[in-house]
Image (cartoon, rainbow, N blue to C red):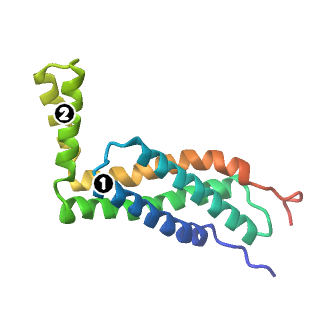
Amino acid sequence: MNEQPSTARTSLKWGAILGLVLMLITLVMYLTDQTSNPLFTGLTLGAMVAFLILSMRDYRSLNGGYMSYGEGLGLGALLSTIAGLLSSAFITFYNVVIDPTVQQRAMDKAREKLEEQGVMSDEQIDQAMEMSAKFQSPGFTFIAGIFGTLFIGFLLSLIVAAFIRRNKANPFE
């Protein structure tokens, strides 16, 4: 009797690898002081799509060439959660231990952009900066990173699983 492959095992493997890749992207972004560069957002999304495709194809091949839409969606959500846990833990560690000035530099850049636009008064900019500072705590950053990665990963999984799935002709096999 054939043993059914586990979506959890596949998710753990590919989620850990994606988590390491996201850590590397974040590290390069921080070291080059490019925290507001949209290239890194695109790179992160591209990595997530690539690893979702790789993981779903891996699971499908382990499962005799078949994967349901639900299996793909579950696999993608779990993979995203694992990657989010790892990358959020790294970002929190980096921001608290290695370089606590990262968030302050990002806030300073945001202030400069708001001042250059000239749409808001100084009072409004100060209020916006105060509000943003409330969301910069390590705990909030960690939780938001996990749920943000899970949310984006789930949305991407909805699309990727639709293309990678391959249902059995006889569901009772």
**Considering the numbered disc 2 on the image, is that residue within a helix, a strand or a loop?**
helix
Using residue 128 as the reference point, say whether residue 10 is left or right of it: right
- Looking at the image, tell me whether mark 2 or mark 1 is earlier in sequence order: 1
**Residue positioned 32% across, 64% down in the render:** 90
Measuring from the top left, give residue 33's x and y in whole percent: 27, 51
Tell me if residue 95 comes above or below residue 6 in the rendering: above
For label 1, the residue is 32
Q: What is the residue that sits farthest to the bottom in this orientation?
A: 1
The residue lying toward the viewer, choosing from 158 and 32, is 32
Q: How dense is the environment of label 1, judged by Cα within 10 Å: few (below 14), some, or many (20 and up)?
A: few
Residue under label 2, please give it: 111
In the rendered image, which quarter contains the C terminus? bottom right
- Number of numbered discs visible in the structure rendering: 2
61 and 120: which is toward the camera: 120
For badge 2, the amino acid type reads Arg
Q: Would residue 23 appear left or right of 72 to someone viewing this image? A: left
Residue 51 at x, y percent in the picture: 58, 59
Q: Residue at x 53, y 54 (%)?
A: 48
Image quadrant for the N terminus?
A: bottom right
Residue 82 position (above or below residue 9)? above
* Amino acid beneath label 1: Thr
Place of residue 150 in the rendered image (x, y in percent of width and height, measured from the top left)? 47, 52
Give residue 25's position: percent from left, percent from top. 41, 58
